[in-house]
Amino acid sequence: MRMKEVTQNRRKPVTAPQLVKIVVFLVVTALIFQFLTLLYDRPKSYRLYEYETLPENTVDAVVIGASTVYRYYNPMEAWEKHGISSYAYGIAGAVGENTIFSLKDLLKHQKPEVVLIEVRGFLGSRSMNGMTTDMYRYIKNYASPFKRWEILNHYNKMTGIRFSSDQLPYYLTLIMNHENYWRLFDTSNWKRVIKGGKRDFSAIDASQFMGYAIKDRVVPQSAIPYDEHYQTKLAQGGENALRELLSYCRKIGQEVVLVASPYVYTQDDMGELNAVTAIAQEYNVPFLNANKDQEKLGIDFSTDYYDAHHTNLLGAVKYTDYLLDYLTQHYQFTDHRGDEAYTVWEQEDAQYQPAREAALSSLEAQIQAAAAGQETGAEAAAEPVGTGSGNQTVTSEEGSPSDDGED
């Protein structure tokens, strides 16, 4: 009787038909998961896509950073005035610890004579909660979960801060982009996935000019006087990342210039910007801090901004000219206007001209309305100005909804 019970309880071996069913189930599940992943996917930023499609070795200079790049540096002005082929390589949510990844990526496609690195992403305190949103926005541009792991691990290494244990959304695209459920009902999106096509950028093409995004809104701001003698320290992550980046550029022989776009900085921001000055001197790297060069820059906080951390077209033109003054004095750039190899710049310039005129007309109307005592910038009027540091706090400017939509 006991032998019979043992025999009855013994597992039956999996038959060939059952094994086939299991394999088919797993394959079908994997295919459905992958299909949904592609449907839900938020493709990489248009700025990255455009940069990667430019003719090889045609970019003279690149400015790299976050929204502090694509709202400040205007490559079309550089093209029109000097025939310089440049690019605003700004990625929303790109904090200082991410910059080395952006640099390595852009160097895969181009060999610019000089790379300008926006330093505002290296300022501010670090915390797990404070960086989660920015990091989440940045790594969405990377399809590989292994690359995402590398970026997160690098941030941990630089800062000594560990993200929460709930990191699965960072690695699995479907979970990361679950909020894009509306893509399930977008027939054009289904066609794109089925045909293996790429994202259609036609809707935003006209407002993106070699990475720069025109803003034609005026919201008056104000800033405290800049004190070059007040110095504090960068947070551990920011300083480690900046030193790592400068060491890497020295190792590969890449010409680099540190820059800081002008904004409504705080006392702490000033102290950290001055700390960057000391580090730049240590590495013998130029640092153009526009915040202390406001008079030379000619920036007007009452007309040249649309929020405390970003310029409109008026401010962007002034800041771009400020950088070009330095670049044209220290580098010998070839004037590429009329060169067939640079046709893409000519084409974008043709689109830029009417967009530029329309934006300037809009800005002038707003400025005149404000001068006439009409209400303008009502949305921002209720917001306190200058209460946050550069761009690394919980609510960074790269994390604002208005800029997120443009990527």
Image (spheres, rainbow, N blue to C red):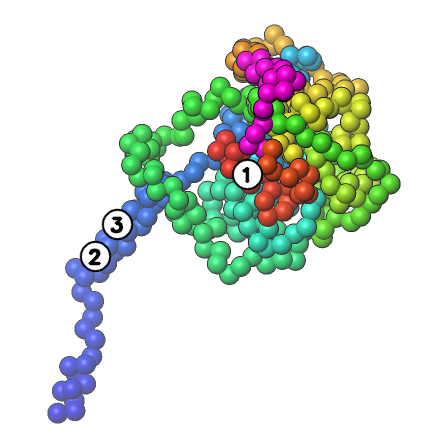
* Residue labelled with disc 2: 20
Tell me how far mark 2 sits from mark 3, CA to CA. Answer: 12 Å
In the picture provided, is 156 more to the left or to the right than 268?
Answer: left
Label 3 secondary element:
helix
The image shows residue 135, relative to residue 59, as above or below, that is below
Magenta: predominant secondary structure element? helix
Q: Does residue 76 lie above or below 133 as drawn?
A: above
**Residue to which mark 1 is pinned:** 400
Report the residue marked by disc 3.
28
Quadrant showing the N terminus: bottom left
Q: Is residue 337 visible?
A: yes
Q: Which residues are magenta?
A: 358-380
Q: Is residue 246 above or below residue 214?
A: below
Residue at 47%, 45% (x, y): give it: 144
Outermost residue, right side:
229
**Residue 318 image position (x, y, % from top left):** 70, 20
Q: Residues within 10 Å of mark 2 (few under 14, many from 20)?
A: few
Q: What's the amino acid at mark 2?
A: Val
Relative depth, front residue between 137 and 53? 137
Tell me if residue 366 is in the magenta stretch.
yes
Q: Residue furthest front?
A: 373
Q: From what the image shows, is residue 218 above or below residue 24?
A: above
Instruction: Please report whichever mark, 2 or 1, sits nearer to the chain's N-terminal start.
Output: 2
Judged from this view, the residue extending furthest toward the bottom is 1
